[in-house]
Image: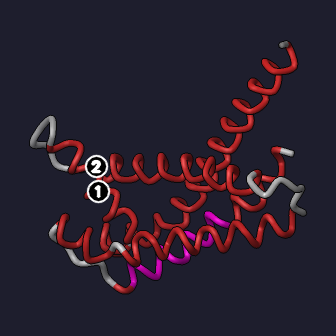
């Protein structure tokens, strides 16, 4: 029974570690996006536009307040943390130990797939829901930033062991 409790506790710590690493990778991603936001506003960072729509849908249920940049970025960081857990779960579902160099490659591919799903493929959905247009440069910045997320995720996840 003690081993079972120990393995459950280990699993919980592994999830928390993946969550923290996802958050750190998302913070690094956000730091890369800040100069583009300062230069072009929210239109300069496509996923901040997506997150502002998501936050506004939640806020509308409770008030008429507008979505601020900190709320949009907060949602962005929350997604990064949660997707760190998803990435770790995908890696462990393989059942074998994956070399750190392969983890880095998988993480970059993973971040590219995330970018394809959102904001790229969901672009028109969020544009209609948010009443804005995603610019090509905003999508390009988002693609660059997703790669930064993938690099940091791939470098840090192997630290979990």
Q: Please, is residue 2 above or below residue 22 in the view? A: above
Q: Which mark is residue 52?
A: 1
Q: Determine the main secondary structure of the stretch shown in magenta.
A: helix
Q: Residue at x 69, y 58 (%)?
A: 153
Q: Residue at x 46, y 64 (%)?
A: 34
Q: Label 1 crowding class (10 Å Cα cut-off): few <14, some 14-19, many 20+?
A: many
Q: Quadrant of residue 65?
A: top left
The furthest residue to the bottom: 136
Reading the image, the residue beneath label 2 is 55
Query: Can residue 142 be found in the magenta stretch?
Result: yes
The residues tagged by marks 2 and 1 sit, at their Cα atoms, a distance apart of 5 Å
x%, y% of residue 128? Answer: 17, 71
Q: Do the residues bearing badges 2 and 1 touch, measured as CB atoms within 8 Å?
A: yes
Q: Tell me: 137 left or right of 20.
A: left
Q: Which residues are magenta?
A: 137-150
Q: Please, is residue 26 above or below residue 18 in the view? A: below
- The residue nearer to you, when weighing 45 against 107, is 107
In what element is the residue under mark 1?
helix
């Amino acid at each position: 029974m003690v081993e079972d409790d120990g393995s459950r506790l280990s699993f919980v710590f592994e999830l928390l570690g993946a969550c923290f690493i996802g958050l750190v990778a998302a913070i690094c991603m956000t730091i890369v996006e800040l100069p583009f936001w300062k230069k072009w506003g929210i239109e300069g960072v496509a996923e901040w536009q997506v997150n502002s729509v998501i936050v506004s849908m939640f806020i509308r249920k409770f008030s008429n307040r507008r979505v601020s940049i900190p709320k949009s970025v907060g949602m962005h960081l929350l997604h990064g943390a949660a997707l760190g857990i998803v990435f770790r779960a995908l890696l462990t579902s393989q059942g074998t130990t994956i070399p750190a160099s392969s983890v880095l490659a998988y993480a970059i591919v993973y971040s590219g797939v995330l970018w394809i799903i959102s904001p790229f493929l969901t672009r028109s959905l969020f544009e209609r829901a948010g009443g804005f247009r995603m610019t090509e440069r905003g999508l390009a910045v988002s693609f660059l930033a997703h790669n930064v997320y993938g690099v940091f995720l791939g470098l840090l996840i192997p630290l979990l062991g």
